[in-house]
Every structure is written in C-alpha cells, then in structure tokens.
Image (tube, rainbow, N blue to C red):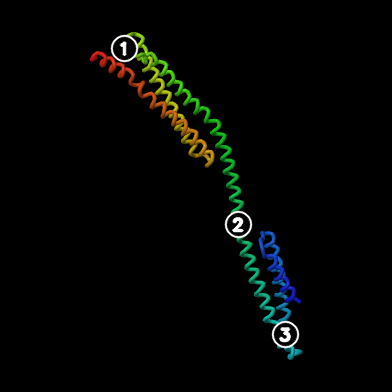
Amino acid sequence: IAEIEATQALESVQAMMEGEVNEESLKAVEELLQGQQAAMLDAHKVLAADIMDARRSVPKAVPLLNNLTPRVRSVQASLAQEMKRTKQLYAKKKQEADVAKEQAKAAAGITKAEQRDAKALEEALPEAMETVTAAEDSFDAVVTAASPLSIEFADPNSEPIQVAIKDTEATVAKALEAIKAARVKLNKNVSEAKGFAPEAKRVALTEYSALQEKLNELQKKLVPYARIRKDQEQRQEAKKVT
C-alpha cells in the first residue's frame, strides 16, 4: 500500500511540476514528498521487522519478503531524487523572487529620486534662465549705447560720439560681468545636476547646456563692441590718410 501511495504521489508531483511553478506550489510538493518519505521509511521498518519474524516462524516467506526490499528502496530513491529536484527548484525560485523584490525596491527608489530631482530642477531652472536673460539684456544695452557709432559720416571727435564710446565701453564691462555671473550660476547648476537620477540628469544637462550656449553666443557678439574705441581710432586714422 505504501508503495502504491508513494508511486501515486510521485505521479502527482510530476504533474504539478509541469509548466510554470511558484514558491507556494513547490512548498506543497515538498510537503507531499516529505510525507511519502516518512511513510516509506515506516514501511521499510515494518518490512524489516516482518522479515525477522518470518525467519523465525515462516522461513519459506523470507524470499518473498526480501523481494519487496528493492522495490521499497527504489521508491525511496525516486522520492529522494524528486525531493532534491524540488528543493533546487524552490531555491532557484526563491532567489528569483528575492532578486525581483530588490529590483522593484531599486526601481521604486529610482522613481522617488527622479521625482525629487525633477522638482529640484523645476525650482533651479527659472533662476538660471533669469541670469541668462539678464546677460542678454545687458547685451541689448551695449547695442543701444553703440548705436550712434553706426552713423557713417559722424565726426569721431564730436562729443556725442565720444560719449557713445564711453557708454559702450561701460555697458560692455557690465555685460561681461553679467555673463560671468551667469556662467558661475550655470556651472553650479551643472555640478548639482550631475548627481541627479538618470532621467532628471539628462533633462537638466540638456537645459543647462542650451543656456550655456546662449552665453557663448553673447560672448562672441560682444567682441566687436569691446574694441569699439580702437576701431573708431583706426577709422579716424584712415580718414586722415585719405
């Protein structure tokens, strides 16, 4: 009877192990196998006791009983093999579940970090944009100050031209200071953004890079105005020659 029950249990286990299995089903298989191993161990003990009794009382029955021993051991071996396979699979599934939990935890952490850093960018970006806008406004002031110098036949020694040159130089200096301040601010923002979560970092560096490029363009545009006095002097010398 124990052999039949164990064989049926093995068939059930094999059916349960087909397809996708989870920790819960593997635990149930393990408990089933443990129960059958215990039953077969008891059966083996009973058989051993029956063989000893038969040797004393019914010697002719001993060979028949001995023939049962390999069958019992065979079933025990099958149960042990199946138990080993179940434990290995259970350990694998548990490891996969643990890894999945850690990944989910890490993903949740990344999401939280992304939200935090996105908020930090949302707060920092407007101020950075304001510093660049201030630099752009200072450049517009330079253009305005230098506008009288664009008159082709104006007397370079006239008071309006000399005032325009001084005003241009003064506004150029202010513009350079504004650009310098904006660069310092952006460099600090970029340094902070490099510590952001991946997506927030990508967005932040893209935004700050665009602002830095604006400053580079402003710097280039300022170059002609920075040498405005020298250019005016060269024009005056050229007129003297002609």
Residue sitting at x 33%, y 9%: 158
Q: In the image shown, does 23 or 138 lie closer to the viewer?
A: 138
The residue wearing badge 1 is 156
Q: Alpha-carbon distance for marks 2 and 1?
A: 83 Å
- Which residue ends up furthest to the front in the rendered image? 242
**Which disc, if any, is residue 65?**
3
Measured as percent of width and height from the top left, residue 156 is found at 31, 12
Measured as percent of width and height from the top left, residue 171 is found at 40, 18
Q: Local crowd at mark 2 within 10 Å, few (<14), some, or many (≥20)? A: few
SS of the residue under disc 1: loop
Q: Local crowd at mark 1 within 10 Å, few (<14), some, or many (≥20)? A: some
Q: Alpha-carbon distance for marks 3 and 2?
A: 47 Å
- Which residue ends up furthest to the left in the rendered image? 241
Which quadrant of the rendered structure holds the C terminus? Answer: top left
Residue sitting at x 36%, y 24%: 223
Q: In the image shown, does 54 or 162 lie closer to the viewer?
A: 162
Name which residue type carries label 2.
Answer: Glu
Q: Is residue 174 above or below residue 189?
A: above
Choose top left, top right, bottom left or bottom right for residue 89. Answer: bottom right
